[in-house]
Image (spheres, rainbow, N blue to C red):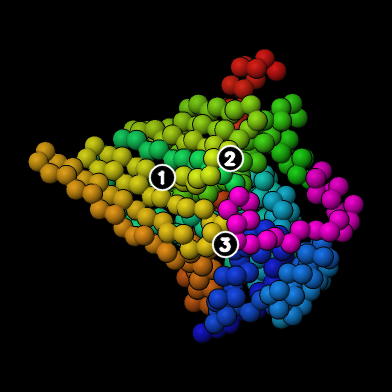
Amino acid sequence: MTKLSLGLLGAGEVAQLIHLPILQQMQDRYQIAALYDPSPSVLNAVADKWAVPKRYDTVETLLADEEVDAVMVLSPDQFHGEHARAALRAGKHVFLEKPACLTVADLQSLIEVQQQTDRQVMIGYMRCYAPAFMQGQKLLQQMSDIRYARVRDLICEGPWFFRKWSEVVTPADDISADVLTSGRAKRMADLKAVCGEDAPPAILKSYEVLTGLGVHSLSAVRMLLGSPRRVISAHVGQDGTQIHALLDYGNFVTSYECLIDDVVRFDATIEVLSRREELSIHYDTPYIRNLPGRTVFQASSESENSSQTFGPFYKDPFQVELEHFHDVLTTGVPVRTHLHDAVRDLELCQEIIKVAKLSFLRKYNK
């Protein structure tokens, strides 16, 4: 099996808790060859722990390493487009964590750069690689006359879970002031480019929630049902961590609900209903490794009723997507989650925000 030399741009929470442990288990496919992080303390601690042979203090120097075949862009969201474009121009393949970018303009610029190369870019929509989801795709083919779909992300955030079993190395106040200032300014500029200069904090926060959490579910629904025609209605709670949207699919509607709170549970579910069938796909928190997903299919007739549970599926979706990335680069299979679909996902997030903002401003007279 061909072994790929991989460089990581960013060594934060997701890299430490998820990607690096999985890559260590996939040494038949990948060598973790190089690491970049703007924090010297994080860079050295993480490289020491995972025995990464090369450490770089700039993105440019890592990308200039001719021994690196591909990079994983794990940097803050506002830098995804910039870092992915630089990687492509340096001749590297790119695994790009979601969201691909924060604005459609940034993403379109990335697509233009990729089209000028023969390099591959794959979006890390890990829920689309979950065995429970792929089982659901197969079962959906048995359904006709879809009448309703319901999607929800009711979650407690990751730190409550991972602090029970691991620690994350955080910067020891050693990221340069210029990097911090420019990063914050870039993020705010991107958020206001989408939400408007007059957007209240709750609307800005809700767009961060949609692109950071909601896009997982919305991309999976797109792969199941396609993109909606329009956003019928959308509501954002005052702090931006409660979102509800009703999506128009022509013959049926899809409800998306999102809530981030401090109740310790992770309820991430997709449900699709026809007249006589119901399909449900269940995910658990990714912050505890190998928690199982499952798929349930119920079918009813005039005289009979049956319910089948598929799973529990213990294989980690992050591992499945990295296996696919390796196959893309070594065998030529098509990318399953690519940039053009990410445009559709960002456009939907932006439309939800547009509709929610009008409702929010009317409600609070701001």
Q: Position of residue 75 (x, y in %)?
A: 71, 58
Q: Amino acid at mark 3?
A: Met
Q: Give above or below for 265 relative to 330.
A: above
Residue reaching furthest to the left: 303
Which range of residues does the magenta coloring cover?
159-185
Q: Secondary structure at mark 3?
A: strand
Residue reaching furthest to the bottom: 1
Q: Amino acid at mark 2?
A: Asp
Q: Is residue 55 left or right of residue 206?
A: right
Q: Amino acid at mark 1?
A: Ile
Q: Residue at x 69, y 51 (%)?
A: 77
Depth check, mark 2 against mark 3: the one in front is: 2
Q: Position of residue 11 (x, y in %)?
A: 72, 63
Q: Which quadrant would residue 166 be assigned to in this image?
A: bottom right
Are circles 2 and 3 on residues that touch, CB within 8 Å?
no
Q: Position of residue 78 (x, y in %)?
A: 72, 49
Q: Give how far apart the Cα atoms at labels 2 and 3 are.
A: 33 Å
Residue reaching furthest to the front: 164
Q: Earlier in the sequence, mark 3 or mark 1?
A: 3
Q: Earlier in the sequence, mark 2 or mark 3?
A: 3
Q: Which residue is mark 3?
A: 122
Depth check, mark 3 against mark 1: the one in front is: 1
Is residue 214 in view from this perspective? no
Q: Residue at x 84, y 59 (%)?
A: 172
Q: Residue at x 50, y 40 (%)?
A: 154
Q: Secondary structure at mark 1?
A: strand
Q: Count of labels shown? A: 3
Are circles 3 and 1 on residues that touch, CB within 8 Å?
no
Q: Residue at x 51, y 84 (%)?
A: 1
Q: Is residue 218 left or right of residue 36?
A: left
Q: Give how far apart the Cα atoms at labels 1 and 2 are.
A: 22 Å
